Amino acid sequence: MFYYIVDDDEVFRSMLAQIIEDEDLGEVVGEEEDGAFVEGEKLNFKKVDILFIDLLMPIRDGIETVRRIVPSFAGKVVMISQVESKQLIGEAYSLGVEYYITKPLNKIEVVSVVRKVIERIRLERSIQDIQKSLNNVFQWEQPKGRIESGLEEKKIADSGRFLLAELGIAGENGSKDLLSMLEYLYQYEKKETFEHGFPVLKDIFQHITVKKLGEMASEGEIDKERKASEQRVRRAIYQSLNHLASLGLTDFSNPKFESYAPKFFDFTIVRKRMTELTNESLSSTGHTRINTKKFIQVLYFEVKRLTEDD
C-alpha cells in the first residue's frame, strides 16, 4: 500500500511514517505541510492508496482539501486532528473520509485503522476484478492495436494531469485546453513523427477547437472559441509562472522550482517575475512576455518522458 501524509507538523509526519514502516504496512510515497499543495491528480499519479490529512492547517484545511480532491482522488482518506468537534467529524465523514484519528498519535489506533482500511481496499479490488472478468467474458474482443492505443492515450492524459498539478495549474480553466493539446500532439506525432517540425501554434488551437465544437460549427463560432482557448491557455501559463516564482522566493533550492522553472520559462522571465512578486507588482503580470509555444513543447515532451518512465 502507498501512503501520503499531509500535516503542518513535521515531527508528526515523521512519527506516522515511522509507524507505517515499522509495522510493514506499506510505503510513504510523499508528504506535504498544507492542503494547498495537494491535488487529486497528483495523488493518483503516485498511486496513493491511503491519504492521511490533518484537519486544521494554515492555508487550506483538511475539510476543504478533501472537498476539492474527492471528485478525482481514487484512494481512501483518513482524517487526523486534535479537535473533537462532532460537527467537523460529521462533515468529514459526509465527504467520504473513512476514519478519524485523534491526536496525540496512538500507535495501536493507527495500526488498527490502517489495517481496516487496507481490508476494505482489498475487498473492493476483489469485487472489481470479478466484474472485469465477467465483462471480458461477455464483451466482444477488441482489436489489440486499439486497446494498446487507448492505454497509451490514458497514460498521456494521466501524466499530463500530474504535471499540470506540479506546475500549479491543474485547477485552471486553461488546463483542459492544455490536456486537449497533449492528446492532439500525441496523435500528430504518431502520424507525422514531427518530421517537418512541431505543429504551428495556431493550427494546434484550431484542431482542438474543431474537435470541441464539432465539424458542423460555423467559422465564426470556431474563431471565437479558438481565441477564447488561446486566452485561457495564456492565463494558465501566467499562473504557472507565478506559482514557480513564488516557490523560488520561498526556497530557491525547492526541487520543483529547480526542475521546472528553467525548463518551461526563460530564467530571466522567472527572475523578473520573482522581483515583481517581491514588490507586490501583481498587476504587471500581463506585461510579462511568455513563450507559449515553448511551454507547450516542453509540456508535451516532459509528459512523454513521464509516460515512458512509468
Image (cartoon, grey):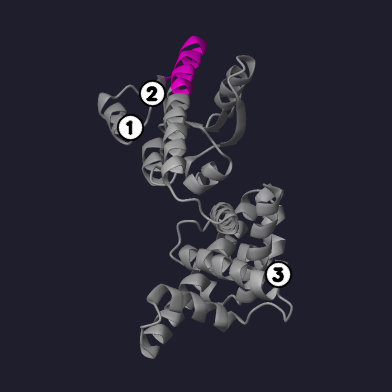
Residue at coordinates 38% horizontally, 27% vertically from top-left? 98
Residue at coordinates 53% horizontally, 66% vertically from top-left? 178
Q: Residues within 10 Å of mark 2 (few under 14, many from 20)?
A: many
Q: CA distance from mark 2 to mark 3?
A: 46 Å
User: Which image quarter: residue 33?
Assistant: top right
Establish if 201 lies above or below 18: below
Q: Position of residue 191 (x, y in %)?
A: 65, 73
Q: Horizontal placement of 262 versus 58: left or right?
A: right
User: Which image quarter: residue 214?
Assistant: bottom left
The magenta segment is 102-119
Query: Which of the numbered marks, if any, corresponds to residue 92?
Result: 1
Between 19 and 33, the residue placed more toward the observer is: 19
Q: Residues within 10 Å of mark 3 (few under 14, many from 20)?
A: some
Name the amino acid type tagged 2.
Tyr
Where does label 3 land, which residue? 266
Name the amino acid type tagged 3.
Asp
Establish if 215 lies above or below 6: below
Q: Position of residue 163 (x, y in %)?
A: 59, 55
Query: Which of the numbered marks, if any, corresponds to residue 100?
Result: 2
Q: Are marks 2 and 1 in contact (CB under 8 Å)?
A: yes
Q: CA distance from mark 1 to mark 3?
A: 43 Å
Query: Is residue 109 highlighted in magenta?
Result: yes
Query: Which of the numbered marks, if any, corresponds to residue 139?
Result: none
Q: Residue furthest top?
A: 108
Name the amino acid type tagged 1.
Ala
